[in-house]
Amino acid sequence: MASPLFLCILLVVFGSYLSTISAAGDVTPRPDRAGAAAPLVHRHGPCAKSPSTDKPSSFAEALHRSRVRADYIMSRALRGRDTTTTIEVVTLGLGTPAVEQVLLMDTGSDLSWVQCAPCNSTDCYPQKDPLFDPRKSSTYAPIPCGSDLCKSLQSDHFDNGCSMNGNGTQSQCGYRVEYGGGLKTRGVYSNEALTMAPGVVIKDFHFGCAYKQIGSDDKSDGLLGLGGAPESLPVQTSAVYGGSFSYCLPPVSSGTGFLALGAPSNTSGFSFTPMTPFMDYATFYLVKLTGISVGGKQLRIPPKVFEGGLIVDCGNIISHLPSTPYAELQSAFRAAMAAYPLIPSDEYDTCYNFTGYSNITVPKVALTFTGGVTVDLDVPNGVLLDGCLAFTESGLDDYVGFLGNVQMRTLEMLYDVRGGRLGFRAGAC
């Protein structure tokens, strides 16, 4: 049996992704891919450098978190705030010299942040790594209050007024983000060098240097926002990478995935479906589901019930479907799994007791999107979570749903924002 160390060896060949970057507008791309890549792992898996203590204790808790996030995203479309329940982490370098930061990765968030020194245990939650200390970086600079960058926070409701630096000589731009799970973060909006991989440095990366945290204690160093608003990493680097990025979420039990900026020059291995913003709200990416199959058999679902679309949300654990497609999926899946006993529960309805079974056969589940793009979910990693069907009901037919991160496992998800399309590549990690 392979050791955990062997399983955590990076599965991406960096030479296929890297560019030499000296500034946001100064780049010499490799001919095969104009981008940069960093390793990505599951925060509760064996490859995590600092495994989170915030792991859901049961499928019921994971389902609860997923529903809270989904509800909050819908309310955010009306109120303008951020939300996160992400479970994937990426390791990057911040500052000069670069200091390793383990960040939660989220396509449902825009403004990135890390906890910064000096910050005591009352104001910041404890993390495994030392706090990032901007005083030790030669490239750190707070963003001045009154600058265009600071003013841009107002339109996205991330602004938090201004504050003087420790010497009382400069007015600094304040930021704040409030999340659906109760976490609140505040601090100074700042510029810094971000290292994606050795020799791959993005200068003038805008992020929040956090000095005040309220809420969650997940031991990560901060968050990396991959949404579509101006504060996100893909939009900040769009002059170089065209706003495109991709990632592959590995199975929980083994392996390492990746996060890559830019699109490959050859996309022949991908299947693409149209992608649009959700309700003209730039953060979220929306695609249209048109069908579902179980065990190779297409389910009989009226196309009109999919009209609300799915928000592609790597920060949401479980996929949410409108009532009719969810009921059809549940019924077909239960029929295919009739050999295994269901666990009776009022909280969730399709969980199994596999005790005593040495071989478990899980039916293949496939999702079909606009354009006839059919994506086979990884079995069982993309179908089951803790022995439960990793789907839930989002609401009435035509109501917007969510494509969660369980269904994304082992797929490379390519966000071609300028091209208005989402790509899927099977077996990428």
Image (cartoon, rainbow, N blue to C red):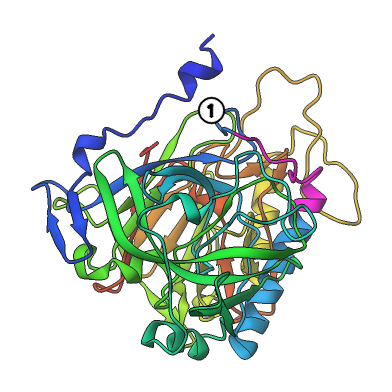
The residue depicted at 54 percent of the width and 30 percent of the height is: 47
Q: Along the line of sight, which residue is nearer the eye, 114 or 53?
A: 114
The residue wearing badge 1 is: 254
In the displayed structure, 328 sits above or below 250; it is below
Three-letter code for the amino acid on which mark 1 is drawn = Ser
Q: Is residue 383 left or right of residue 68?
A: left
Task: Name the quadrant of the C terminus.
Answer: top left
- Secondary structure mostly seen in magenta is loop
Q: Is residue 407 left or right of residue 85?
A: left
Q: Along the line of sight, which residue is nearer the eye, 415 or 308?
A: 415
Queried whether the magenta region covers residue 185, the answer comes back as no
Task: Name the quadrant of the N terminus.
Answer: top right
Report x, y in % for residue 222: 58, 55
The residue depicted at 46 percent of the width and 49 percent of the height is: 136
The residue depicted at 57 percent of the width and 67 percent of the height is: 402
- Crowding at mark 1 (Cα within 10 Å: few <14, some 14-19, many 20+): many
* The quadrant where residue 347 appears: bottom right
Residue 226 visible to the viewer: yes
Report x, y in % for residue 206: 41, 68
How many marks on residues?
A: 1
* The quadrant where residue 228 appears: bottom left
The residue depicted at 49 percent of the width and 87 percent of the height is: 279
Queried whether the magenta region covers residue 52, the answer comes back as yes
Q: Along the line of sight, which residue is nearer the eye, 279 or 193?
A: 193
**Which secondary structure lies at badge 1?**
loop
Report x, y in % for residue 212: 69, 66
Magenta extent = 50-62
Residue 371 visible to the viewer: no
Q: Along the line of sight, which residue is nearer the eye, 301 or 168?
A: 168
Report x, y in % for residue 211: 65, 64
